[in-house]
Image: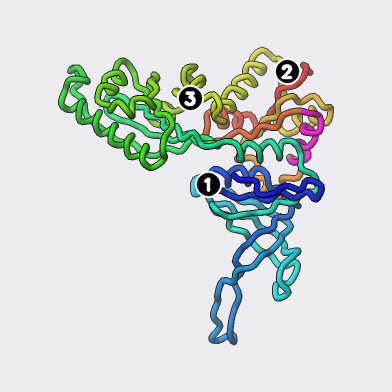
C-alpha cells in the first residue's frame, strides 16, 4: 500500500491500494464512524419509469462508515455508510458502498489515529510481499501454498504415483512426479516472481527432487521436513526453526510465535487472560502487554455492527502502550486463538 499524503492534524491519510493484501490491511484499519473519501460509481436512472435506463456515474463521495465487509478468499472489500459529502444531485444521508479494488485510492479520516492503526498502515506500506511458495509432498501427493501477509493461500494439489518398494529417485514414475512438481513450481515462479521456494517432504525425497531442479531455480529453494501434505503439511513447515529464520520478517511466522508464547503462559498459569470479559477488564487496568485478536472476530463484529466494544478495548491497550496484534484465522495460531474465544492477552504481570 502506498501512502499518498498524510495530515494527522486533520486526521486524514490518503492511500493507494496496490494489491489484494492491502485490502486485508484496510479492513483492519477502517473502523465504524470513520469517514472515507474516494472516487466511486453511483447508479442513476435516466428517463421515465417505464423506459428508465440505469447507468453508473463516476462521482467523488465522502461517507461516514457504518459497515466493513471483507472476504479474504475472494479479495472483496466493501465499505458502506451514509453520504456526508458529494455532488448536489446525490442527497446527504443516502447510503452508498465503496467496492475497493487494487489501484483504487482512498482517504481515511479518523478523529484520532491510534498507534496500532498507524503501525498497520506502515506495515502495509513498507512490506513487500516476499512471495514465498511452500511445497509439501510425499509418496503420492504434492500441495502448493503461497505465503501471504495475512496467512497463506492454498494454490493447488497434484497426485502422482511411486513404486512403493523402489528407490523413488530412480524410478521412472518417481522422475515423472518430480518433474510434475518442478513444472508447477516454475509456473508459480513465473506468475508470482517468487523470492523463496520451501520444499518439504518426509525422508530423503526432497533431496532427490533437488537433483532435477535447474541451477538458477535451486538458488531460491530451501529444504525442510514435513509428515503431511495439504494444510497440515504447510502449518508444519511454518513451525520449523529453519523456516522461521529464513522468513523471519513474514507476518505469519511472527503471529504463530506470539500465540505460542500465549499458550506457554496459559500452561504455566502465568501472565495471561482470554475471552472478551477478562481481556476488557485487564485493558481497563492498563495490564495488557500483547493483545491478540483473530481477524475473523473483527470482520464478523464489523459486519454485525457490534465492533465498538472491541474497538474500545483496542484503544485502551493502545493508550496504555500495549501492542495490538491481529492474528489471521488462516493459520493454526488463529484457529487456536479462536478456540479460546478469539481474543486474549499476555499481561505485564500475573493477575
Crowding at mark 1 (Cα within 10 Å: few <14, some 14-19, many 20+): some
| CA distance separating discs 2 and 3 | 26 Å
Residue 63 is left or right of residue 72, and the answer is right
Q: Position of residue 301 (x, y in %)?
A: 67, 45
* Quadrant assignment, res 50: bottom right
In this image, 177 relative to 295: left or right? left
Residue under label 3, please give it: 238
Residue on which the image places disc 2? 271
- Give the alpha-carbon distance from disc 1 to disc 3, as whole Å: 23 Å
Disc number lying in front (1 or 3)? 1
Judged by depth in the image, the label closer to the viewer, 1 or 2, is 1
Q: Quadrant of the C terminus?
A: top right
Q: Which mark is residue 19?
A: 1
Q: Please give the name of the residue rendered at 31% of the width and 24% of the height, measured from the top-left corner.
A: 138
Q: Is residue 304 visible?
A: no
The span from disc 1 to disc 2 (Cα, nearest Å) is 38 Å
Looking at the image, residue 121 sits to the left or right of residue 211; the answer is right
**Boundaries of the magenta span:** 311-321
Callout 1–callout 3 Cβ contact below 8 Å: no
Amino acid at each position: 500500500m502506498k501512502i499518498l499524503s498524510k495530515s494527522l492534524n486533520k486526521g486524514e491519510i490518503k492511500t493507494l491500494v496496490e494489491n489484494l493484501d492491502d485490502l486485508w490491511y484496510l479492513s483492519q484499519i477502517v473502523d465504524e464512524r470513520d469517514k472515507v473519501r474516494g472516487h466511486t460509481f453511483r447508479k442513476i436512472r435516466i428517463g421515465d419509469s417505464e423506459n428508465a435506463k440505469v447507468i453508473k456515474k463516476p462521482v467523488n463521495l465522502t461517507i461516514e462508515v457504518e459497515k466493513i465487509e471483507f472476504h479474504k478468499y475472494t479479495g472483496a472489500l466493501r465499505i458502506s455508510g451514509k453520504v456526508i459529502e458529494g455532488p448536489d444531485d446525490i442527497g446527504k444521508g443516502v447510503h452508498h458502498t465503496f467496492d475497493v479494488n487494487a489501484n483504487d485510492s482512498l482517504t481515511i479520516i479518523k478523529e484520532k489515529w491510534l498507534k496500532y492503526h498507524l503501525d498497520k498502515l506502515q506495515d502495509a506500506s513498507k512490506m513487500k510481499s516476499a512471495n514465498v511458495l511452500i511445497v509439501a509432498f510425499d509418496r503420492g501427493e504434492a500441495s502448493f501454498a503461497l505465503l501471504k501477509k495475512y496467512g497463506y493461500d492454498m494454490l493447488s494439489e497434484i497426485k502422482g504415483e511411486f513404486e512403493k518398494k523402489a528407490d523413488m529417485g530412480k524410478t521412472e514414475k518417481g522422475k515423472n512426479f518430480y518433474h510434475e512438481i518442478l513444472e508447477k513450481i516454475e509456473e508459480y515462479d513465473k506468475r508470482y516472481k517468487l523470492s523463496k521456494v520451501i520444499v518439504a517432504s518426509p525422508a530423503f525425497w526432497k533431496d532427490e527432487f533437488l537433483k532435477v531442479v535447474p541451477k538458477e531455480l535451486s538458488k531460491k529453494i530451501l529444504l525442510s521436513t514435513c509428515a503431511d501434505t495439504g494444510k497440515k503439511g504447510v502449518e508444519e513447515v511454518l513451525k520449523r526453526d529453519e523456516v522461521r529464520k529464513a522468513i523471519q520478517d513474514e507476518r505469519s511466522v511472527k503471529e504463530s510465535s506470539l500465540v505460542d508464547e500465549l499458550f506457554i503462559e496459559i500452561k504455566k498459569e502465568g501472565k495471561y487472560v482470554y475471552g472478551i470479559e477478562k481481556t476488557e477488564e485487564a485493558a481497563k487496568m492498563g495490564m495488557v502487554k500483547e493483545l491478540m485478536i483473530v481477524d475473523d472476530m473483527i470482520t464478523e463484529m464489523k459486519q454485525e455492527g457490534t465492533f465498538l466494544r472491541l474497538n474500545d478495548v483496542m484503544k485502551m491497550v493502545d493508550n496504555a502502550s500495549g501492542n495490538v496484534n491481529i492474528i489471521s484465522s488462516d493459520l493454526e495460531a488463529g484457529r487456536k486463538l479462536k478456540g479460546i474465544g478469539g481474543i486474549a492477552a499476555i499481561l505485564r504481570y500475573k493477575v
